Image (tube, rainbow, N blue to C red):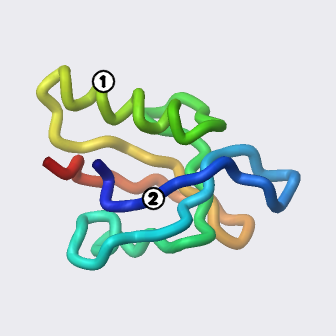
Amino acid sequence: ALGARTAQAQEPATVRGVLITAVRSGTDAATKQLRPGDVIVSANFRAVTTPQEVQAAVAAQRSAGRANITLAVTRGGQTRFVGVKIAE
């Protein structure tokens, strides 16, 4: 739904979150420069540690009629907030 495939993050041990394993080209996730190896640490300002928690946050946004979700994404020790369109 985000244009990104996720998995349970394993490394580095100091970052807890959901690992992005793939990003489909042409999606908003790709446009916002999300990449494999990035770790989603929160979705709509709630900590996430499993792909199911990210999926639930996306589903909640969609059911509320919202077209975007805010993700906190960590890469190289830096965290940034990214608004991503939810794919149809």
Could you tell me which secondary element the residue under label 1 belongs to?
Answer: helix
Q: Residue at x 32, y 42 (%)?
A: 69
The residue closer to the viewer here, 80 or 20, is: 20
Q: Could you give the CA–CA distance between mark 2 and mark 1, rounded to whole angstroms?
A: 18 Å
Q: Position of residue 39 (x, y in %)?
A: 61, 57
Q: Residue at x 83, y 61 (%)?
A: 12
- The numbered dot on residue 10 is none
Residue type for callout 1: Ala
The residue closer to the viewer here, 14 or 54, is: 54
Whether pointer 2 and pointer 1 mark residues with C-beta atoms closer than 8 Å, the reply is: no
Name the residue beneath numbered marker 2.
5
Could you tell me which secondary element the residue under label 2 belongs to?
Answer: strand
| Residue that extends furthest to the bottom in the rendered view of this protein | 25
Q: Position of residue 13 (x, y in %)?
A: 87, 53
Name the residue beneath numbered marker 1.
60
Q: Residue at x 23, y 47 (%)?
A: 86
Q: Is residue 72 left or right of residue 29?
A: right
Q: Earlier in the sequence, mark 2 or mark 1?
A: 2
Q: Position of residue 47 (x, y in %)?
A: 60, 32
